[in-house]
Image (spheres, rainbow, N blue to C red):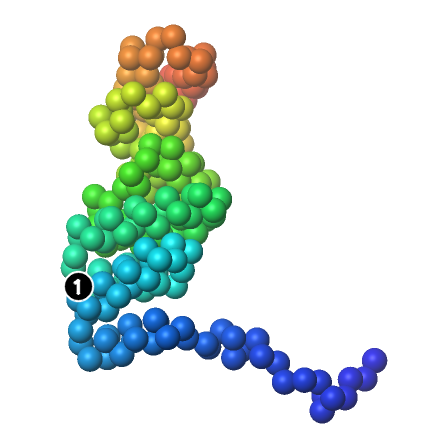
Amino acid sequence: IEVDIDDLPDSNRNSRVLEVSPEMRAVEILMHEGKTEQAANQLAGLIRNAPGELEARDRLLKLLRLMGDEFRHREQGQSYISFLFGENKISQAARVFQACYEFDKEFKPQKPGERLELGRYLRQNSSPKQAMALLNNLHKDFPSYENIPQAYLMVAQILCEQFNEDARARQVLNFILENYPSHPMRDAVQDYLRVVDDVSSH
């Protein structure tokens, strides 16, 4: 089928992509003028009024990293990840976490469920060290969280399967059995402990 190109309307897809809102244009002007603090405040205000403005969230995090502002960076990163979880955008949340963690090794989402889900996603997507960073010390940060055995079973699996750390995996599994003796995960933990013992004996 031959299409007469001259008969086609001009595509406005690219022009839509290149459109910049007046608020973001004001931020760009402040950035060009070197007024980074004002630009950060403008972006934060824009996010408060429109939480779904992801471009503003991305820009603010990058700006705070540039400014070296760890405190606000943690606040904004945690807020962003929680928003993405609310939208069921786990892969985007993982990307935000990875960028935040690269800047700040102490960065973690503020909710235990987010840490567990991101840990699972990152493990499945070949980022076991970052998964471990998320799950590390979960029992200290959230002592009453009901899914700690589930999280720590994953930690033991990562230690054994990705890092060949069988002894450390065994320590984690025994910790679960000792501290959560009536948890529904107990049988799965005992099964995996047998797997670790079997692997270690060969």
The answer to whether 27 is drawn above or below residue 153 in the figure is below
Quarter residue 56 falls in: bottom left
Residue for point 32% across, 47% down: 79
Q: How many marks?
A: 1
Instruction: Report the residue that reaches farthest toward the right.
Output: 1
Residue for point 43% across, 51% down: 92
The answer to whether 38 is drawn above or below residue 47 in the figure is below
Instruction: Report the residue that reaches farthest toward the top.
Output: 182
**Quarter in which the C terminus is drawn:** top left
Q: Is residue 178 visible?
A: yes
The amino acid type found where label 1 is placed reads Met
Residue for point 57% across, 75% down: 13
Quarter residue 199 falls in: top left
Element type at mark 1: helix
Q: Position of residue 87 (x, y in %)?
A: 47, 46
Instruction: Report the residue that reaches farthest toward the bottom.
Output: 6
Q: Position of residue 146 (x, y in %)?
A: 36, 21
Of 78 and 150, which appears nearest the observer?
A: 78
User: How packed is label 1: few (under 14 Cα within 10 Å), some, or many (20 or more)?
Assistant: few
The residue pinned by badge 1 equals 67
Q: Position of residue 106 (x, y in %)?
A: 21, 43
Of 136 and 91, which appears nearest the observer?
A: 91
The answer to whether 101 is drawn above or below residue 146 in the figure is below
Quarter residue 179 falls in: top left
Q: Position of residue 190 (x, y in %)?
A: 41, 13
Q: Is residue 34 left or right of residue 133?
A: left
**Quarter in which the N terminus is drawn:** bottom right
Residue for point 23% across, 53% down: 73
Q: Is residue 170 visible?
A: no
